[in-house]
C-alpha cells in the first residue's frame, strides 16, 4: 500500500515562497520516484497576513498543524514589521506549542563549495549540532522593572529542566549512534560560569553516557567550541548544547560550510510533528528577482524525508544537491549561481528523476 503524507506548507515572507516552490518541486519528484503520495496544505501566515489582519497566528492553526506529518517553512521576517514580533509570535510559538524540542543542524561542506577556512575540505567539515529548542533563555521568563527610567532592571532567565535537558541529550546520543560516523558526542556549555544550568547539563550528560558505551564523550566550553570549529572542525561529529549556545554556534557552522544559502535545519518533535526550514532569512530585498539560492530549502526537504523514514528518497535528494554544487553552480551566493532560483530547482529535480547516487 502506497504511503501518503500530509505536509503543511508555510511559504512565509520575502523570498520564502520562491525557495519553497523549488523545495516542493524536488519533494514531488522524490515522491513520484520512490512511490509515496503527498497531500499538501498551504498556510499563508507571516508579515503580509499580520499587516492586513493584525493576527500573528490564526485561530486553531496549531491544532491543524499538529495533525500533519511534517511542516515545510520558507522564511519569516518582513521589513515593515518590527523585528521580534513575527519571530517570537510564529517561529517560537510553533516550536513551543508543537513541542519541537530538538533543533537539528547538519554542518556539511560539499565539494564545489568554498569555505572561508584555509585548507579545509569536505572531509574536515561534516558534523551535526543538536540544540535544545524549547527551554533556556528563549523560554521567555523574566521581565522589566521601572522601564524607561535610570533605575530600569531587565531580567531574562534561563529555564533548564531535568526532563528537557535529558530528552535532548538522549536524542543526541541516539542520533550519534545512528549517524555512525565518528561516534563521538561533545557537550558544549559553560560550566565554569553558568554553574547552575550547566551543572545540570553536565551531570545529566555523564549519567546518560553510561548507557552508551559505544559513544565517545567529550566536553568543551562554548568559546572553545567557536575557536575549534574554525581551527579544527574535523574534531567534531555531533555536538549537543542548550538553546542560546546552539543558536550561536550553528550560524558559525553555516558560514564554515559555505553560507546561509545552503544551510538547512529541522525543528524536531520525535513523537509528533516536525518543521523544516532553510536557515537563512526571508531576504526581502531579493523578492521576485529569482536570484536566491534554493538549496538550503531543498536540503530541508532532505531532512524532512529522513525524519519521515523515506531514507532512499532523502539520499537521492542529497546526491542531487551534491552533484549540482559540484558540477553546475558557479557560486552559492545570491545572483552568482549562474542560474535562476527556478533553474537550480529544475537541475536538482532532473538529477532526482535520473537516480543520481543510486
Image (tube, grey):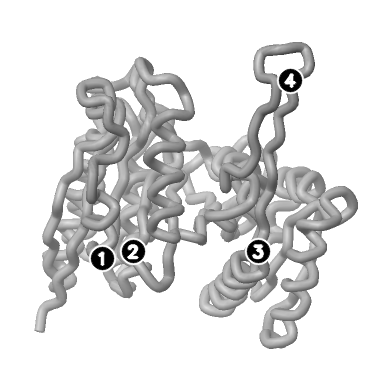
Residue 270 visible in the snapshot:
yes
Q: Which residue lies at the image location 34% right of the left edge and 21% below the top edge?
A: 284
Is disc 4 in contact with disc 1, using a CB cutoff of under 8 Å?
no
Marks 2 and 3, Cα distance to the nearest angstrom?
22 Å
Left or right of residue 92: residue 219: right
Q: Name the front one of labels 2 and 4.
A: 4
Is disc 1 in contact with disc 2, using a CB cutoff of under 8 Å?
yes
Element carrying mark 1: loop
Left or right of residue 155: residue 13: left
First in sequence, mark 1 or 3: give its number: 1
Q: Name the residue under label 1.
A: 69
Marks 1 and 2, Cα distance to the nearest angstrom?
6 Å
Q: In which quarter of the image is residue 17?
A: top left
Q: Name the front one of labels 4 and 3.
A: 4
The numbered dot on residue 152 is: 4
Q: Which of 1 and 136 is in front in this view?
A: 136
First in sequence, mark 4 or 3: give its number: 4
Q: Quadrant of residue 78?
A: top left
Is disc 1 in contact with disc 3, using a CB cutoff of under 8 Å?
no
Q: Which residue lies at the image location 66% right of the left edge and 53% below the top edge?
A: 159
Q: How crowded is mark 4: few (under 14 residues within 10 Å), some or many (20 or more)?
A: few
What percent of the width, then of the height, locates residue 337?
35, 31
Marks 1 and 3, Cα distance to the nearest angstrom?
28 Å
The numbered dot on residue 273 is: 2
Q: How crowded is mark 2: few (under 14 residues within 10 Å), some or many (20 or more)?
A: many
Q: Quadrant of the C terminus?
A: bottom left
Q: Name the residue under label 3.
A: 161
Q: Name the front one of labels 2 and 3.
A: 3
Amino acid at each position: 500500500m502506497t504511503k501518503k503524507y500530509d505536509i503543511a506548507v508555510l511559504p512565509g515572507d520575502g523570498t520564502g515562497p520562491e525557495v519553497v516552490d523549488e523545495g516542493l518541486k524536488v519533494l514531488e519528484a522524490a515522491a513520484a520516484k520512490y512511490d509515496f503520495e503527498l497531500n499538501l496544505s498551504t498556510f499563508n501566515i507571516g508579515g503580509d497576513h499580520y499587516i492586513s489582519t493584525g493576527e500573528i497566528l490564526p485561530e486553531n492553526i496549531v491544532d491543524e498543524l499538529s495533525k500533519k506529518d511534517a511542516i515545510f517553512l520558507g522564511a519569516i521576517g518582513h521589513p515593515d514589521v518590527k523585528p521580534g514580533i513575527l519571530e517570537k509570535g510564529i517561529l517560537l510559538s510553533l516550536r513551543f506549542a508543537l513541542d519541537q524540542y530538538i533543533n537539528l543542524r547538519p554542518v556539511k561542506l560539499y565539494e564545489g563549495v568554498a569555505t572561508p577556512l584555509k585548507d579545509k575540505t569536505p572531509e574536515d567539515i561534516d558534523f551535526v549540532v543538536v540544540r535544545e529548542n524549547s527551554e533556556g533563555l528563549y523560554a521567555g521568563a523574566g521581565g522589566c522593572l521601572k522601564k524607561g527610567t535610570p533605575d530600569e532592571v531587565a531580567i531574562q532567565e534561563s529555564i533548564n529542566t531535568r526532563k528537557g535537558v535529558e530528552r535532548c541529550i538522549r536524542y543526541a546520543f541516539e542520533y550519534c549512534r545512528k549517524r555512525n560516523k565518528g561516534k563521538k558526542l561533545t557537550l558544549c556549555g559553560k560550566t565554569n560560569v553558568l554553574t547552575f544550568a550547566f551543572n545540570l547539563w553536565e551531570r545529566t550528560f555523564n549519567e546518560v553516557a553510561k548507557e552508551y558505551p559505544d559513544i565517545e564523550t567529550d566536553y568543551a566550553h562554548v568559546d572553545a567550541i567557536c575557536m575549534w570549529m574554525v581551527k579544527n572542525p574535523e574534531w567534531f561529529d555531533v555536538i549537543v548544547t542548550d538553546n542560546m549556545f546552539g543558536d550561536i554556534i550553528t550560524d558559525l557552522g553555516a558560514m564554515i560550510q559555505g553560507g546561509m544559502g545552503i544551510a538547512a535545519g529541522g525543528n524536531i518533535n520525535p513523537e509528533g510533528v516536525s518543521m523544516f526550514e532553510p536557515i537563512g532569512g526571508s531576504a526581502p530585498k531579493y523578492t521576485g528577482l529569482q536570484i536566491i539560492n534554493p538549496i538550503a530549502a531543498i536540503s530541508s526537504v532532505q531532512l524532512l524525508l529522513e525524519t519521515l523514514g523515506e531514507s532512499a528518497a532523502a539520499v537521492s535528494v542529497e546526491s542531487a544537491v551534491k552533484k549540482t554544487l559540484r558540477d553546475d553552480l558557479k557560486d552559492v551566493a545570491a545572483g552568482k549561481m549562474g542560474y535562476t532560483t527556478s533553474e537550480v530547482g529544475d537541475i536538482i529535480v532532473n538529477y532526482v528523476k535520473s537516480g543520481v547516487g543510486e
